[in-house]
Image (tube, rainbow, N blue to C red):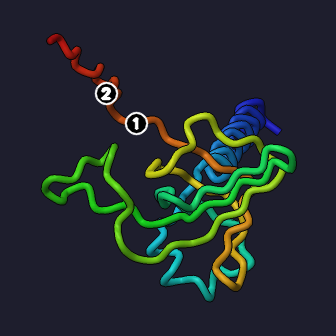
Amino acid sequence: MPKRLRFAIGTGLIIAAIGYLIVAAVRNTAEYYLTVNEVKVRQGELAGQMLRVAGRVAPGSIGWDPITLTLSFGLAQPPPADQPGVKAVAASVGGGPIFHVICRGEPKPDMFAANRDVIVEGTLAADGTIEARQVLTSCPSKYVPKQPAPLNRE
């Protein structure tokens, strides 16, 4: 076999191997998440599957047991950001479906609070409960410090 042919075959195999590694890496690292409304529409077909759901923590729904490391909360669709008078960072939960989320065996995220945007990774049960294995919080897009109380000088 001529040297040029062996070189061309070897180069082709190396390029094919590198291409395969790139495609495999992109498939494994590309993670898509669904919104609460998308999950509600496709709830029947998604039941029992692993999924990632983006939503907002419903106020008044947080339950935390530090002894068993069990976190439970309601996950709702955030309001659209283009509504006039609604701040994306501090806006409350929009109307619509709410899923109950239970995460066991993981510490509560530091930034976790009511009206905070989160991504939940877990399994959707047939009854609409999400058994989460991980809860990721997002940082606010803009930090606004608390304003000090005005001094009362009389």
Q: Residues within 10 Å of mark 2 (few under 14, many from 20)?
A: few
Q: Are marks 1 and 2 in contact (CB under 8 Å)?
A: yes
The local secondary structure at tag 1 comes to loop
Residue farthest along the top direction in this orientation: 153
Residue 7 sits in which quadrant? top right
The disc label shown at residue 144, or none: 2
Task: Tell me which residue sits at (69%, 42%) in the image.
Answer: 108
Residue that numbered label 1 is attached to: 140
Q: Secondary structure at mark 2?
A: loop
Q: Which one is in front, 123 or 30? A: 123
Quadrant containing the C terminus is: top left
**Location of residue 84 (image quadrant):** bottom left
Residue type, mark 2 in image: Val
Q: Is residue 127 left or right of residue 85?
A: right
Q: Is residue 149 left or right of residue 8?
A: left
Q: Give the percent coordinates (x, y) of residue 80.
A: 28, 61
Residue at 62% of width from left, 70% of height from top? Answer: 100
